[in-house]
Image (tube, rainbow, N blue to C red):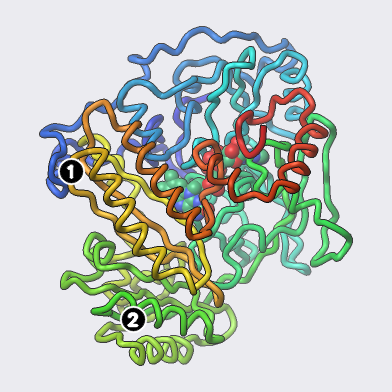
């Protein structure tokens, strides 16, 4: 079992502590250049952390002989499974304190082995933490308790096959451990796609998406993984739940809904029948600039409430637009993209641009994408170069997580969080986040903070704003500062009745906000479900419900 898995179809090494591939991280000089953007950061980057410097410890439990071939206690593998990829995780690794390192890591290859591992763990009081790509940004894959004898990280990535494709019903049975590119590569020969592209696509799995109710990077329409589920198989300590494959059903509360978003606390999702789509053949994109962000919000609402259904409708505030290179003159930028497998989309794009111009937008340019990026924004092709603001935004979007880790090495504190609210509350909510979270970050550090915002998903009745807070930290105190910023953000979201998370999930970091948001009778029902399905309380303890 290798410590740092290679990417699909490549021999590149995954970073054990940071985002993505180790060889794609900014080098020291690039880190210093990034640090120069934020006053008060370190003069030199923190060193790249090494597993050899951690105190990994001996495992507190030994697997039975029958399961031993699935399990490793290799320190490198265990360290790579200790945490997710939030800023909080990155900085803890940089400071040599990644938290509780799992005693063992198991990589089962089919459902029976998953059930056997759960049986064994249940009988011995071993906590089991399901692990897909490990891209959680909410503390979803780490153990923070002290009541279990040992911790087993259950890595699903050896279960990564597309088992069946039903081209008649356009759906496929897919194992949950398939990373995004692995899954799409197996669907491509059939001319089909799942068309679910979170920013973390390359390093996250189908099971992780289902367990967290992930949001893809299409702005409107079917973009949540929930929309594509036909049926689920979930192995629980109380038995395996397999729902029927149905296009729709009114037969009582949906069993799939119980497990979608269950974050490993109710069972291990091992496979799913997923709805597929034809690959798009027609694409077009454009960008429109706005001097006034409020007018831009109105333009986005008008487009969301029309019947145009853009694949991409992403509004970048001036700070986001500047950082991504989409604008250099202080404008906000609206990035629009359309795609279809059936018919040309230029007419719909033109109507959306007209709506944006009618709401105070200006300039902008259009492109007709060919092959396109996985995030819904077409890349340039030979015939018609894509819009330059669109291309700039797209490459910054894919590079951003690496840059965040570079900033963390320079002692910066970087927090990203997202929410959703109805349109009537959105302008005041965005203002309150900018002002109050910005002040909290400055108060915690003594340094000026930037708070940028982009709209990632738009709905006729509301929108999902995504915020990035960046500020120079105090060496060694980054986690406490991050906690203060998170607390301030959660307080504002709660006051505006905006959800604690639109697509990043609850995990451990959002538990306080989720507990406030969740109706009390629903909490009772969820606790009863946990009692019934996980009687020994071994599944991802501390996540969702106690
Ligand atoms: C740079 C970056 C960008 C991101 N962009 C997006 C985005 O665009 N949209 C979005 O929705 N999220 C995004 N995320 C968050 C994260 O990628 C998602 O939550 C993703 O769905 C997690 O998938 P994973 O396979 O990495 O799961 P993991 O991180 O391994 O696990 C996530 C949670 O699900 C549980 N789990 C995992 N697999 C299973 C399973 N088979 N059965 C039961 N439980 C399981 C885990 O125990 C954990 O609680 C991003 C994260 C990063 C770091």
The answer to whether the beta carbon of the residue marked 1 is less than 8 Å from any atom of ligand 1 is: no
Given the current orientation, which residue lies at the most extreme front position?
A: 495
The answer to whether the beta carbon of the residue marked 2 is less than 8 Å from any atom of ligand 1 is: no
Quadrant position of residue 298: bottom left
Q: Report crowding for label 2: few under 14, some 14 to 19, many 20 or more residues within 10 A (C-alpha).
A: some
Q: Is residue 26 visible?
A: yes
> Quadrant location of ligand 1?
top right
Residue highlighted by disc 2: 295
Rounded to the nearest angstrom, the CA distance separating label 1 from label 2 is 31 Å
Q: Position of residue 406 (x, y in %)?
A: 25, 40
Front residue of 188/60: it is 60
Q: Report crowding for label 1: few under 14, some 14 to 19, many 20 or more residues within 10 A (C-alpha).
A: some
Quadrant position of residue 246: bottom right
Q: Secondary structure at mark 1?
A: loop
Residue displayed at 81% across by 51% down? 255
Would residue 188 appear left or right of 529 to someone viewing this image? left
Residue displayed at 42% across by 75% down? 370
Residue displayed at 46% across by 42% down? 137
Given the current orientation, which residue lies at the most extreme right position?
A: 251
Q: Quadrant of the C terminus?
A: top right
Q: Which sits earlier in the primary sequence, circle 1 or circle 2?
A: 2
Residue highlighted by disc 1: 447
Q: Position of residue 523 (x, y in %)?
A: 71, 43
The answer to whether 536 is drawn above or below residue 361 in the figure is above
């Amino acid at each position: 079992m290798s410590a740092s898995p290679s990417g699909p179809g490549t021999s590149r090494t995954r970073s054990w502590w940071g985002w993505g591939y180790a060889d794609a991280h900014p080098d020291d000089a690039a880190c210093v250049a990034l640090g120069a953007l934020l006053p008060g950061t370190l003069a030199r980057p923190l060193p790249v952390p090494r597993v050899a410097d951690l105190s990994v410890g001996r495992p507190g439990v030994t697997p039975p002989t029958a399961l031993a071939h699935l399990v490793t206690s290799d320190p490198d593998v265990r360290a790579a499974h200790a945490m997710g990829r939030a800023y909080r995780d990155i900085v803890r690794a940089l400071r040599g304190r990644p938290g509780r390192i799992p005693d063992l890591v198991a990589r089962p290859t089919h459902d029976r082995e998953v059930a056997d591992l759960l049986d064994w763990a249940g009988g011995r009081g071993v906590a089991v933490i399901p692990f897909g790509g490990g891209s959680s940004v909410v503390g979803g894959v780490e153990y923070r308790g002290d009541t279990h004898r040992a911790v087993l990280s259950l890595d699903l990535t050896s279960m990564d096959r597309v088992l069946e494709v039903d081209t008649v019903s356009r759906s496929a049975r897919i194992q949950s451990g398939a990373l995004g590119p692995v899954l799409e590569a197996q669907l491509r020969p059939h001319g089909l796609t799942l068309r679910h592209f979170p920013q973390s696509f390359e390093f996250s799995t189908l099971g992780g998406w289902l367990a967290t109710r992930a949001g893809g990077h299409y702005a409107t329409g079917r973009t949540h993984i929930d929309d594509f589920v036909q049926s689920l198989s979930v192995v629980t300590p109380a038995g395996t739940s397999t729902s029927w494959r149905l296009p729709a059903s009114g037969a009582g509360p949906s069993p799939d809904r119980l497990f979608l978003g269950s974050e490993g606390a109710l069972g291990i999702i091992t496979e799913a029948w997923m709805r597929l789509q034809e690959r798009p053949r027609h694409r077009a994109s454009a960008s429109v600039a706005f001097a006034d962000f409020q007018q831009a919000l109105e333009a986005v609402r008008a487009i969301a409430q029309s019947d145009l259904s853009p694949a991409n409708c992403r509004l970048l505030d001036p700070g986001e637009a500047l950082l991504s290179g989409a604008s250099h003159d202080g404008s906000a930028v609206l990035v629009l993209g359309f795609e279809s497998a059936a018919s040309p989309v230029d007419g719909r794009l033109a109507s959306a641009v007209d709506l944006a111009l009618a709401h105070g937008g200006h300039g902008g340019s259009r492109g007709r994408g060919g092959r396109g990026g996985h995030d819904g924004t077409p890349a340039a092709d030979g015939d018609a170069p894509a819009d330059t603001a669109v291309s700039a935004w797209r490459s910054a979007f894919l590079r951003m997580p690496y840059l965040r880790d570079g900033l963390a090495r320079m002692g910066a504190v970087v927090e990203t969080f997202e929410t959703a609210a109805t349109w009537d509350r959105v302008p005041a909510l965005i203002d309150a986040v900018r002002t109050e979270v910005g002040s909290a970050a400055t108060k915690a550090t003594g340094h000026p903070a930037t708070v940028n915002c982009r709209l990632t998903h738009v709905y006729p009745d509301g929108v999902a704003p995504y915020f990035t807070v960046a500020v120079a930290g105090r060496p060694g105190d980054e986690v406490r500062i991050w906690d203060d910023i998170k607390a301030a953000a959660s307080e504002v979201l709660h006051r505006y009745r905006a959800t604690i998370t639109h697509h990043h999930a609850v995990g451990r970091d959002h538990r306080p906000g989720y507990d406030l948001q969740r109706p009390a009778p629903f909490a009772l029902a969820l606790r009863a479900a946990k009692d019934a399905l996980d009687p020994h309380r071994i599944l991802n303890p501390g996540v969702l419900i106690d």
